[in-house]
Image: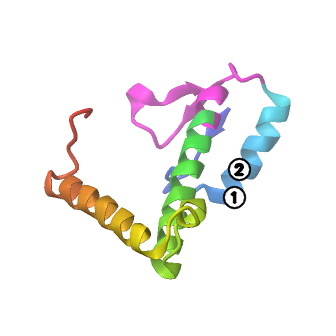
């Protein structure tokens, strides 16, 4: 199994990649060997299971990004927003923003990096 084409990135596979993974999952075992042509040579060899796990993680990450953008647009933070009154919500958002600002000031470095 070979994955990818010239110019393909993990961010660009989207729905096409999801459809392909569903077809592959039906026909191949998770341990089936694979190769991603646009990955560095030392990491190019992989398995179908590793690729599917990567796709799930990337999908969740991008869904989270989309949710953040939606929250910035409508000012509502999903189910958490309903748990607070207006003043408590403002304090909560202020704490989250302060944490984000602190993280940004460190250049993205944390104690777990």
Left or right of 104? Residue 7 is right
- The percent position of residue 87, horizontal first and vertical second, equals 40, 73
Left or right of 106? Residue 92 is right
Left or right of 46? Residue 49 is right
Looking at the picture, does residue 66 appear above or below residue 73?
A: above
State which quadrant residue 102 falls in.
bottom left
Cα separation, mark 2 vs mark 1, equals: 5 Å
The reply to whether residue 12 is in sight is no
Viewer-proximal residue among 96 and 28: 96
Looking at the picture, does residue 78 appear above or below residue 17?
A: below
Q: Which residue is mark 1?
A: 15
- The percent position of residue 89, horizontal first and vertical second, equals 43, 68
Residue drawn at the location 59% of the way across and 51% of the way down: 59
**Label of residue 18 in the image:** 2
- Find numbered disc 2 in the image and state the secondary structure of the residue it sits on: helix
Q: Quadrant of the N terminus?
A: top right
> What is the magenta range?
29-52
State which quadrant residue 63 falls in.
bottom right
- For the residue carrying disc 2, how many other residues have a C-alpha within 10 Å: few (<14), some (14-19), or many (20+)? some
Q: Is residue 46 magenta?
A: yes
Residue drawn at the location 56% of the way across and 38% of the way down: 54
Left or right of 42? Residue 98 is left
State which quadrant residue 52 falls in.
top right
- The percent position of residue 65, horizontal first and vertical second, equals 49, 61
Q: Are marks 2 and 1 in contact (CB under 8 Å)?
A: yes
- Find numbered disc 1 in the image and state the secondary structure of the residue it sits on: helix
For this orientation, the residue located farthest to the top is 31
């Amino acid at each position: 199994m070979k994955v990818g084409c010239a110019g393909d990135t993990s961010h660009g596979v989207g729905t096409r990649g999801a459809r392909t993974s569903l077809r592959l999952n039906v026909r191949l075992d998770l341990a089936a060997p694979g190769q991603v042509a646009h990955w560095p040579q030392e990491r190019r060899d992989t398995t179908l299971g590793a690729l599917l796990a990567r796709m799930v993680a990337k999908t969740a990450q991008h869904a989270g990004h989309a949710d953040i953008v939606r929250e910035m647009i409508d000012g509502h933070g999903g189910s958490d927003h309903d748990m607070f009154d207006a003043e408590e919500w403002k304090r909560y958002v202020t704490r989250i923003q302060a944490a984000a600002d602190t993280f940004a000031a460190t250049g993205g470095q944390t104690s777990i990096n």
